[in-house]
Image (tube, rainbow, N blue to C red):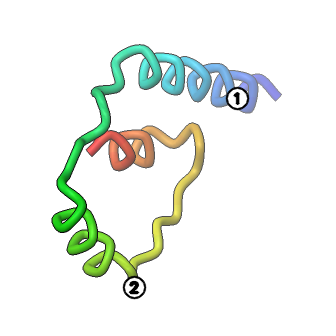
Amino acid sequence: MFIKALRVGLGQLIIAGDFITRPGKKQRPAAAQAQVDEAAKSLTLYQFHACPFCVKTRRT
């Protein structure tokens, strides 16, 4: 029970830190965005909301 509470608490802390320090969204021209969308069409992103590795991936 203590471990679960610790994990949830740390997860919320990680999410809060990510929200506070998140960089702005990248702006691309429409043609470049279409090229990126086409390249990423076959990819699937599996993520957990409070996972530190998933947070790092979302930030890049």
The part of the image, by quadrant, that contains residue 56 is top left
Where, quadrant-wise, is the N terminus in this rendering? Answer: top right
Mark with earlier residue (2, 1): 1
- Residue linked to disc 1: 3
In the drawing, does residue 60 fall left or right of residue 1?
left
Q: Residues within 10 Å of mark 1 (few under 14, many from 20)?
A: few
**Percent coordinates x, y for residue 31 in the rendering:** 19, 67
**Quarter-wise, where is residue 25 in the image?**
top left
Residue 9, percent across and down? 65, 20
The residue carrying mark 2 is 42
Between residue 57 and residue 11, name the one nearer to us. Answer: 57
Q: As displayed, is residue 4 above or below residue 17?
A: below
Pick whichever, 34 or 55, lies toward us.
Answer: 34
Gap in angstroms between the C-alphas marked 2 and 1 = 37 Å
Q: Secondary structure at mark 1?
A: helix
The type of residue carrying mark 1 is Ile
In the drawing, does residue 33 fall left or right of residue 7? left
Report the residue at 24% width, 42% height from top: 26
